[in-house]
Amino acid sequence: MGTSKYKETATSTMQGNQVIYSEEHWRNLAKLRLSASEMMKSLVDAHIYCIVYGSIARGDTSDGSDIDVYLPNPPSPTMIEATLESTGIRSNKREIVQATPNYAAKGYIYIDELKSYSFPLVPLRPSEEDFTGFAGRITYDELAKKQRVPGVNKDLVLIEPNEQGHTETPIKGIEGIVAKKLGVDTTIVHQRQRTLERRMRVGRTGVYIKRELGPDESFGTVFNEIANGNAAIRRRLRKKG
């Protein structure tokens, strides 16, 4: 993620730092959100629920902000790909990623380096369902209404949008308040806090599984091959059944 050139911290208040967005920041945010809407439209038209989350939902975007359209309750990967291709959206890379043995495996369809679609390949645990709520998430209709939502960034700072930009407040010591503001369980706040604090200390570690798909391979076939050698995935799939 790049450092934003489009905002400046104006004041510090009891509610946290007040950040004022420049006109350039608003313009770039609008462009990113338009791109996100265009990516989501074919799915929405096909009645496939999708969201975007993170800085694009909160408003605190930067030069390197990406767009990940997330399908929390996806149909089959084949249907997702067919829906996108029917409107001329082509992938330049597809892969299956599992960050750690305890995390849900996900499919990724990349349009370019900064645009992707992602979806779980196994049933999600409640804490995993809450992850996007922790970061801040919005739907296609909310994007169209120019809504922004609160969420926590990767520096563990609560971002709360307002008309001028946003306020930002470190979440340490106010985890319960943050959970209420975001509508998520306190457990997810503490889990994400531990994960991100560890990342700050030791940096990013490698992912557990990362398998790029060939042009003639399907998500289903490759995922089944991975599951055959992965007991944790097989347990989740049995729960799904």
Image (cartoon, grey):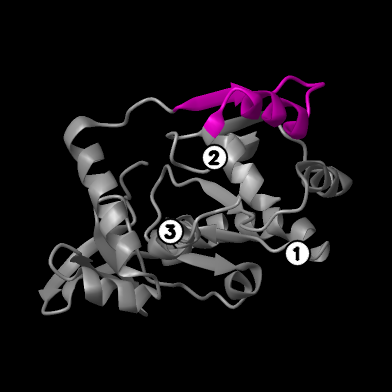
Residue at position x 79%, y 66% in the image = 47
Residue 127, numbered label: 3
Residue situated in front as seen by the camera: 156 or 104: 104
Residue reaching furthest right?
86
Region in magenta: 208-231
Judged from the image, the secondary structure of the residue bearing numbered disc 3 is helix
SS of the residue under disc 2: loop
What residue does disc 2 label? 114
Crowding around mark 1 (Cα neighbors within 10 Å: few <14, some 14 to 19, many 20+) is: some
Q: How many marks?
A: 3
Is residue 170 found inside the magenta-colored segment of the image? no
Circle 3 packing at 10 Å, graded few (<14), some (14-19), many (20+), is some
Q: Distance between the residues labelled 3 and 1?
A: 25 Å
- 214 part of magenta stretch: yes
Q: Which amino acid does label 1 sit on?
A: Val
Residue 66 located left or right of residue 58? right
| Kind of residue at badge 2 | Leu
Quarter of the figure with residue 97: top right
Point out residue 153 in the picture as x, y percentages from the top left corner.
32, 56
Dot 2: few (<14), some (14–19), or many (≥20) neighbours within 10 Å?
Answer: few
Disc assigned to residue 44: 1
Give the quarter of the figure containing the N terminus: top left
Task: Please provide percent x and percent y for residue 157.
Answer: 24, 60
